[in-house]
Amino acid sequence: MIKLNPHTAEKLAKGVIWTVALMVIAVLIFIIVFILYRGLSVINWEFLTRIPRRSGREGGILTPIIGTLSVTLLAILIAMPFGIGTAFYLAEYTKDGILTRIIRFCTESLAGIPSIIYGLFGFIFFVQILDLKWSILSGGLTLAIMVLPTLIRTSEEAIRAVPKTYREVSFSLGGTKWQTIRKAVVPSAIRGIVNGLILSVGRCVAETAAVILTAGVSLSMPKSVLDSSRTMAVHFYQLVIEGISMTNAYGTAAVLIILVFFINVVANMLINRFVAKGR
Amino acid sequence: MKHYIQVGLLSVLLLSVNLLSSCMAGKAHGGLNPTTVIVAGSTSVQPYVEILVEEYRLLYPDNAVGVQGGGSSAGIRAVLNEIAEIGMSSRALNQEEKELGLWSVEIALDGLAIVVHPDNKVENLTMEQVRDIYSRKITNWSEVNGEDRKIHIISREEGSGTRSAFQDLVMGDEMIAPRAIVQNSNGAVRQLVSSDRNAIGFISLGLAEPQPGLQPVKALNLDGFSPTQENVLSGEYELYRAFLFISEDEPTGAARHFVSFVLSEEGQRILSGEGLIPAREMALTGGEGVSDEEV
Amino acid sequence: MNRNKIIIKDLNFYYDDKQAIRDLRLNIPANEVFSVIGPANSGITTLLRTLNRLCDLTPGTRIEGEILLDNKNIYSEEISITELRRRVGFVFDVPTPLPMSIFDNVAYGLRLVRRKNKKTPLESVETALRQAALWDEVKERLKSPAMSLSGGQQQRLCLARVLALEPEVVLLDRPCSGLDPISTAKIEESLTELKKQVTIIISPHNTQQAARISDRVAFMLDGRLIEEGANIEVFSSPKDKRTSDYITGRFG
Amino acid sequence: MKKFKEKLSGRIFFILALSTISALVLITIFIFVEGMPLIAEVGLFNFIFGMVWSPSQGHFGIFPMIVGTVSVTFGAALIGIPVGICCSIFMAEFAPARMRSIFRPAIQLLAGIPSVVYGFWGLIYIVPIIRDRLGGPGLSVLAGSVILAIMILPTIISISEVSIMALPRHYKEGALALGMTHWQTIWRVQLPAAKSGIVAGVILGIGRAVGETMVVIMVLGNAVALPESILDPVRTLTTNIGIEMGYAAGKHQQALFATGIVLFILIMILNITAQIITRRKSK
């Protein structure tokens, strides 16, 4: 190896790192512009509010939008009590022990399991054994399990970030544990918890593999949570893989990116407000 | 803080409205048509059935039909597991499935087109050449009067009706080479062939036609016969298979109503307009087409 | 001589293996200001925290002995901890406002008690803030966040929050550390006023403060009670050499 | 009454906390129950080392897919790890505050974009480039590696950055005070100190690459054969499930669940390794 002068090395390393970082940003911008450039011209009011016709070659993406909203909403509503409850249990109700270690292990493991495995499980368990068929409910339940780790981790962090003094004050004034959590901890942790919820929403919106096996791909307007409906991500996948319409595929992708962007901005605003409010 | 509570309440409200409306919907339809008829299976048949459903919905707005993909085998299994009322298959039932005593009806015939990139010089292949290409005995286009380029073979995945039809009609006992690229829909094969000069694939005949917004592909003649509806009907173009609807027993109620629609003149006209060949016989007992009593 | 509000009998307290309080016996009379002085790590904070069982919150602690409040052991089974903590209030060494409005801070404890008598706690809040000598400064902006107050105001707010519950005993753990002299003076003033109604146990932030405000003084060192007596006695003629060393500033 | 409420709330939280345990147990049970019979029938060795996958003819060998998974993941790691670590050093050390405030949300956005969108981009942008410039069908190990490398960047960057930022200030200050240049400090002091965090991030990133499905279906070509070069199409374990699940019945379906078992075990090994490393770090 050639021994470099430390200052040359410094310059070289700095140069390389700047280049790589800027390239990553460039690639990111390129991908987004690439999709948006072709997609934005497709998006108009009609595209958003019309039911897809001829497998999505014509018409809009109203049904997939409704599918995405309902599957996501359902998943979050189901995951919320479990995720936040677990976070409170871990942060407030227990000391480190075997049980917490097991819970933590399971949470971390769930976080690493690929979505296709969730899809397999959801298909066998919810679709077949519980006989919910391909439905918004099956999809929502599957996604709920999938986002559980995200929700637990972010909520637990938010709860642990609440200063210890708040709890002591509340206890010292005669508060019970429950009152203390409800009145002193929750108000301070709520922003972090909401941020976790938003991250989970993002994951649900973006998921394809798990929902395609559980919520199905029906293009009909769902009448209830027991009906199948495809989400936007699945619709996009179908448009591309079936070669139905590249134009509408770009349009759907653009809507997805804008939605994800919007969700991220909301999350960031919340984080910023959270940080700004902290001491 | 209050804001979040409001959002939360709103979501709960929305959900309960949804649940409530689903109960209501179930009630309103009542006896004959309590739930959505689910049609599931072959991705080859799926796009056509989706179009049929759109038309059907215009005629009978109260009858709900949902279409799922999954593949021919999945469709048959979905019927057996009672996940779906009707299965779609793009291949004949195999022995095992026949023994289960499933009910089936042919809804249309579909030719299989051997497609290549439009710039490919090759116009015609024999059945044997196709077989040799897919078993990789022939690996260069120059061996079949084309340019000196490697052949990229594109196939469908295990379980696909189109693949099993291709296997039966073309390959016989030969195996499709494992090195073949596998795509899981007609559209994906078409997309790939349209963008790769060296590729060859097989897709549903209806999809081989030029499509608005998509790159074209070229359908090859087989043993000198072009893949047209006429040549399929006359038996000169040998690559075709039947699209089937499958059910546990002969369908009744809402499911029967939809099947009748598909087999009616109107339904067959729609399929024919999409490039399929009308079914050879309409084998739904108890009258053809849609009668008003059944609605 | 007043009757004893709190009687501590042979108190020993451990954090895991470390002993923080050793064989402590102490009688604290009612309606007086009782100061506990001593260098850092003498077990004073621990002692205060045992008196309303805040020490229960720290995992791995162990307590021996008895603490009688009005002749009832506060560590016995029949005592409700929440009830006890309402009777014995605690003011921390740093201001600890909760992230809510001034009004909500003071009303916090009241709202924990019961929701059935839905009377607006406005009067109680006002009384408490007056007792803590804060009312005039905040009466115009009860709805603004407590964090917007100055440090001294925040600490008085914390005192008001405790007083709103009308406790019998108030524990103050170095309440004036880090406060400006004016705020300190205001707090001392209100304590002198308060002792008519409540018993006050304070760990002052220096001996001068102890001398200014207390009726009785206890000196602790290494978890042991060294000396205890009336203010003047202890400060003018300490019996133990260590006490006099501490008071004259030779260590600590 | 209050005591009751107190106990009840604790109980409820406890029960809710069991949800993750039951979820993991349920998932494990169902995947294994569905898949084990086939492995038992075919034989573990034949299943894992079998070269032919043709369920309709009764051949269930997934070795080409294991090789596919490993090669694509390796390729993604080869590109993604150095780039990811560079980016995390950039964020933690070099980026001006303003830039960091753009970079971080940008990386978050990168993580939030649905993976199918990346697959699509790869299919219509990367694949033709590979086909036209390098030859082969374009759908290839290389295409998959490039796209997956982009996809695992956010995981590697965020975890590595956090572990570099979390180092005590005096590490850096001490080194600088000894006259080391900024880069020497990073290379000799900060990176070694943050090693376990970075390694954990890398392992989690690799886990993502192994588990990704839709993207690889779109750009890998899915051929069930051992690749001879990085321009050959391959199939991964996830693609095998994703592409054939809908079509499978009977033994074929069991075989896909059996593929799921192999994938599951692979992922759990990666997970547990990452957990052990992070735990050791926190001690």
Image (spheres, rainbow, N blue to C red):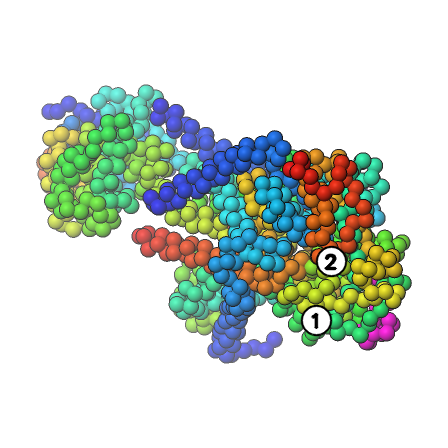
Judged by depth in the image, the label closer to the viewer, 2 or 1, is: 2
**Quadrant, the C terminus of chain B:** top right
Res C242 visible: no
Residue at mark 2: B275
What is the three-letter code of the residue carrying label 1? Arg
Q: Nearer the viewer, residue A239 or D245?
A: A239
Asked whether, in this view, residue A278 is left or right of residue A143, the answer is left
Side (left or right) of D72 relative to B168: left
Q: Amino acid at mark 2?
A: Gly
Residue at 35 percent across and 46 percent down: it is: B3
Magenta: main secondary structure: loop
Pointer 2 with pointer 1, Cβ within 8 A: no
Q: Magenta includes C184?
A: no
Q: Which residues are magenta?
A: B134-149
Query: How far apart in space, not on screen, are marks 2 and 1 (Cα)?
Result: 32 Å
What is the crowding at mark 1: few (fewer than 14 residues within 10 Å), some, or many (at least 20)?
some
Q: Which residue is mark 1?
A: D131
Question: Foreground: B276 or C22?
Answer: B276
Residue projecting furthest to the front: B292
